[in-house]
Amino acid sequence: MDSVNLKGGCKINLFLRVGRRLESGYHELRSLMLPLAEPHDRIVVMPLRKSLTSGLAVRFFALDEAAEIKGIDPENNTLSKTYRWFERRTGFAPPLSLEVYKGIPHGAGLGGGSSDAALFLSFLCDLARRFDRLHDDADFLRDSVEIGADVPFFLFRAPALVSGMGEVLTACSNPCSGLSLLLVCPGIGISTAWAFRELDMKRGERVTALPDSRDPVALMRFGNDFEDLVFERHPETEAVRNLLLAYGAGTARLTGTGSALFGLFYDADAAQKGAEELARRGYSVYRQKLL
């Protein structure tokens, strides 16, 4: 097998409501998610030593600097979890080495780990089919939620209404089509586990009523359940939200559990000026027109 290059973008939650905590540890969710091309991660897949019959080696690098990232457990990460999950499901565990070039900020609520997992899972499926180790009708989209709540969406890779634990996906139109989007990464890492734990503690026994509408435009009004606690813990995130609004965004919101925020602009020129001002303040800013 020759080396293979995989590239995957991120996601934003146009709204995010969190329901009750389930016995699995996951929560019931309702969200409207959009895939974004930038920022992105890149994975280089290479065969491991020919003497090995199975196994996975993973190294992480910064995308822009190509410098190795320390502090990520090479034996216990989203990709190693995907590899073990696939082996349990199929019995197929080819010896592989991965170099992961991270452009999606960690702890930003953009789903970088889940994006990588979906990329790698799709690759493993294709490879297993080549070796006649997987039936053509095998579909792991729903079950891949066992790897991570956002993995089914990254396999789906299209605007979707998301429910269940993240595994129930309904294709929908993009209610923001034609608008300019600014995605701002403040450089703050927020633990997803912390955010859900804090939200549960804050709400106590009160359970959020989850919207049942399938109208993407109507659902946009529901906001993000994590905003108040993230803004309180990290005031800079609220300041970025307010800057986006001041620069002309019609809507500005936290995505996922944060810390990234997005602003939706009707005026492309205002979006460009806002991007320049935010970059001048030292933030990583990604501008794109939504289709």
Image (cartoon, grey):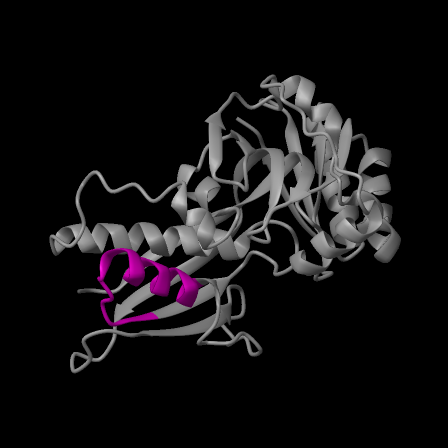
Q: Position of residue 246 (x, y in %)?
A: 86, 35
Quadrant where the N terminus lies? bottom left
Whether residue 207 is in magenta: the answer is no
Location of residue 99 by image quarter: bottom left
| Spot occupied by residue 200 in the image (x, y as percentages of width and height) | 76, 50
Image quadrant where residue 227 sits: top right
The magenta stretch spans residue 88:
yes
* Residue at the image position 56 percent from the left and 24 percent from the top: 174
Residue 137 relative to residue 113: left or right: left
Magenta segment = 79-97
Observer-nearest residue: 271 or 89? 89
The reply to whether residue 213 is visible in this rendering is yes
Asked if 102 appears above or below 28 in the picture, the reply is: below
Q: Is 223 displayed left or right of 242 in the figure? A: left
Residue 224 in picture, x, y percent from top left: 73, 38
Front one among 233 and 193: 193
Task: Please state which of residues 226 and 28 is positioned toward the viewer in this rendering.
Answer: 28
Answer above or below: position of 128 versus 249.
below
Question: Could one spot residue 270 in this view of the protein?
Answer: no
Count the labels in the image.
0
